[in-house]
Amino acid sequence: GMDYCYAPFPPETTTTTTTTTSTTTSTTTAATIAEARITDSANFMSAAFVVGELDYARECASDWPCEACEGDCDRGSHCADGLECFSREVGSVERVPGCLGLGIAG
């Protein structure tokens, strides 16, 4: 099937707080993360997170790795650092953790 790179764990969030005598600023960042609630808990963690939409980018390779929610990968080394390859059965449109859409059935 068509296999996609995904983040096996929710991305880390960085929180910084700056305080002055008159103002308090608090900033939370998480690179391109959109929070979502997903009812299909078989493939998603209870505190669901979404990294992006499934996209067939190319045949991923170790020397040209795919980013999160991109495919087609064959192994983890075909994905960017910290990502793994989510393998699906032939013809499957099984949901990929952290990604929106069904992608292409391979």
Image: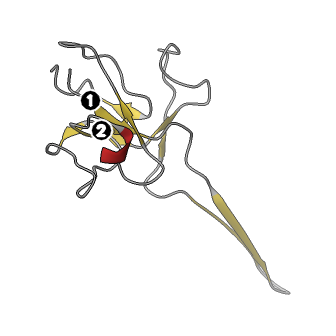
The residue closer to the viewer here, 83 or 54, is 83
Q: Is residue 101 left or right of residue 22?
A: left
Q: Residue at point 46% right, 41% down?
A: 7
Q: Mark 2 Cα within 10 Å, few/some/many (few <14, many 20+)?
A: some
Q: Is residue 41 left or right of residue 95?
A: right
The residue closer to the viewer here, 18 or 5, is 5
Q: Which amino acid does the dot numbered 1 rest on?
A: Asp
Name the spot of residue 26 as percent of width and height, x first. Answer: 70, 68
Name the spot of residue 36 as percent of width and height, x first. Answer: 49, 33
Q: Residue at point 56% right, 39% down?
A: 9
Name the spot of residue 58 as percent of width and height, x first. Answer: 13, 45
Name the spot of residue 98 as percent of width and height, x first. Answer: 44, 34
Viewer-nearest of labels 1 and 2? 1
Q: Is residue 76 depicted above or below 31 in this figure? A: above
Q: Residue at point 17% right, 12% down?
A: 91
Q: Mark 1 Cα within 10 Å, few/some/many (few <14, many 20+)?
A: many
Q: Quadrant of the N terminus?
A: top left
Q: Is residue 67 depicted above or below 40 in this figure? A: below
Q: Quadrant of residue 69?
A: top left
Q: Quadrant of the C terminus?
A: top left
Q: Which sits earlier in the primary sequence, circle 1 or circle 2?
A: 1
Q: Residue at point 48% right, 50% down?
A: 82
Tell me, for residue 3, which label it has, or none.
1
Per the image, label 1 sits on a secondary structure element best described as loop
The residue closer to the viewer here, 69 or 59, is 59
> Residue under circle 2?
53
Q: Quadrant of residue 76?
A: top left
